[in-house]
Amino acid sequence: MRVLIVEDEPRLAENIARSLRESAGYAVDIAADGQEGLFLAESNAYDVVLLDLMLPHMDGMQMLTRLRQSGQHTPVLVLTARDDKESVVALLNAGADDYLTKPFDLGELLARTKVLIRRGKGQPSPVLTIGDLELNTVNRTVQRAGRPISLTAMEYRVLEYLAHRPRAVVSKTELLEHLYDYNWEKFSNVIEVYISGLRRKLDDGSARQLIHTVRGQGYILQE
Ligand code: CA
């Protein structure tokens, strides 16, 4: 998963980014003002946007409105200060999906972020089940037919993304866009390495394969 943080307080932005990277394994980009935020949100594939309201150049409300006007459906969680003049009603009516008042607990922010990602992909349950595969997105554990499977951080990220979109063809490009932040060079052959590692670990001892290749298009996770 890939998250955009639009926040002009560098320390707060970095703290949130570290928490999302370390506790959830998400790729994170940071924009320090509304203009940069809008540009990044429109030119990259984010699974959720965390948006501060009081921002230089273009405020959060304007950015949110522009984003929704351009047809972007990415879930947006607004970070509001207690004295922000925008009302919660106005924010929700402008297309925000949730909000959190500063100062907030990073654990709560993380939990709400996960809810928005799941909801955005039509997966309300925190435990994703595909056949006999079970992926727990809260504690990031995976098991197949009751057998715990130990994955590397990147293998988990690939599997988590696929599990949020079961039975859909997911291309290598889509995986790269959602698993790496802005600073990474993206090489599609790394995805093949993670997929083959996942196959080896998931299918070991099972008669049925879970990750299928659709030639020239991508991968499907299904029974
Ligand atoms: Ca601010």
Image (cartoon, grey):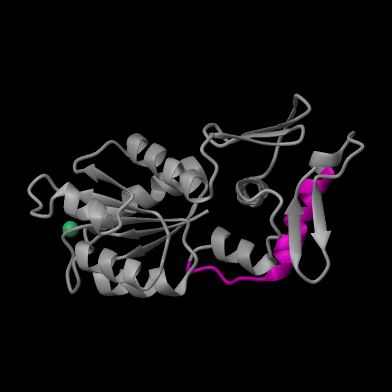
Q: Which residue is drawn at 74% across and 64% down?
A: 218
Residue 104 at x, y = what percent? 24, 39
Residue 153 at x, y = what percent? 62, 46
Quarter that holds the C terminus: top right
Q: Of 53 and 119, which appears nearest the observer?
A: 119
Q: Is 75 located above or below residue 115 in the figure?
A: below
Q: Looking at the image, can residue 150 be seen?
A: yes
Residue extending furthest toward the top: 146
Question: Where are the magenta residues, as a range?
Answer: 182-200
Residue 44 at x, y = what percent? 47, 70
Residue 204 at x, y = what percent? 87, 38
Judged from the image, the quadrant occupied by ligand 1 is bottom left
Q: Residue at x 34, y 66 (%)?
A: 68
Q: Which residue is drawn at 26% across and 46% down?
A: 99
Write down the quadrant of residue 220 in the picture: bottom right
Q: Looking at the image, can residue 33 be seen?
A: no
Q: Which residue is drawn at 42% across and 59% down?
A: 74
Count how many numbered circles sit on residues in the image. Answer: 0
Is residue 184 highlighted in magenta?
yes
Q: Of 62 and 30, which appears nearest the observer?
A: 62
Residue extending furthest toward the front: 93
Specify whether 108 is left or right of 149: left
